[in-house]
Image (cartoon, grey):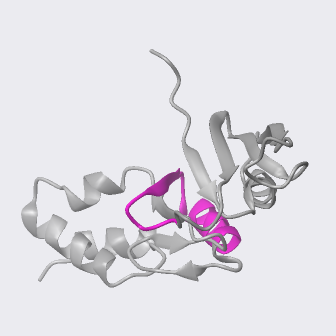
Amino acid sequence: MPRITPNLWFDDQALEAAEFYVSIFPNSRITDVLHYTAAGPGPEGTVLSVNFELDGQPFTGINGGPVFPFTEAVSLLIDCKDQAEIDHYWKKLTDGGEEVQCGWLKDRYGLSWQVVPAGWEAIVNDPDRERARRATEAMLGMVKLDLAALQAAADATD
């Protein structure tokens, strides 16, 4: 199967955004920068697109102008191994961005991210429906997810 590469449309910040993202994620790098030619449609010599990898996952950022801004309809999910990792990515990605809810945030470029503990689905989808309900209620009241609080809510008894 061919590799699928998310293509992120920026106004004119693709290189800046790629540099920001590769500074946050380990094993990440910019692999190529393409510039507009005299053929346009952008000014000759300005950045057209940037290819980069975030921990081996390829992405392309394109400077296509303000026509298509990011919306919450698409987000990138980060499965974090523990609370320290959640806290790390949350702090870095909300710098200049905004916190939303239930582990969602928007970074300084408007791109939506979900910063969640690995295996969180098992807690909110527990076969014990009361346990799942308590965990889900707790999650819906959170902005940044707190793994210990989710677990405590799931384990509590009414």
Number of marks in picture: 0
Establish if 109 lies above or below 7. Answer: below
Q: Image quadrant for the C terminus?
A: bottom left
Locate residue 77, reporting x and y percent.
47, 54
Q: Is residue 91 magenta?
A: yes
- Side of 153 relative to 18 (left or right): left
| Magenta span of residues | 70-93
Quadrant in the picture for residue 20: bottom right
Establish if 14 lies above or below 38. Answer: below
Q: Is residue 141 magenta?
A: no
At 67% across and 66% down in the image, what residue appears?
88
Establish if 91 lies above or below 6. Answer: below
- Side of 28 relative to 129 (left or right): right
Locate residue 43, reporting x and y percent.
84, 55
Q: Image quadrant for the N terminus?
A: top left
- Side of 2 relative to 129 (left or right): right
Quadrant in the picture for residue 16: bottom right
Locate residue 138, reporting x and y percent.
29, 79
At 70% across and 69% down in the image, what residue appears?
92
Residue placed most toward the observer, 96 or 92: 96
Locate residue 14, reporting x and y percent.
73, 56
Residue at the far right in the pictured view: 45
At 54% across and 58% down in the image, what residue appears?
82
At 88% across and 49% down in the image, what residue appears?
44
Residue at the far front in the pictured view: 39
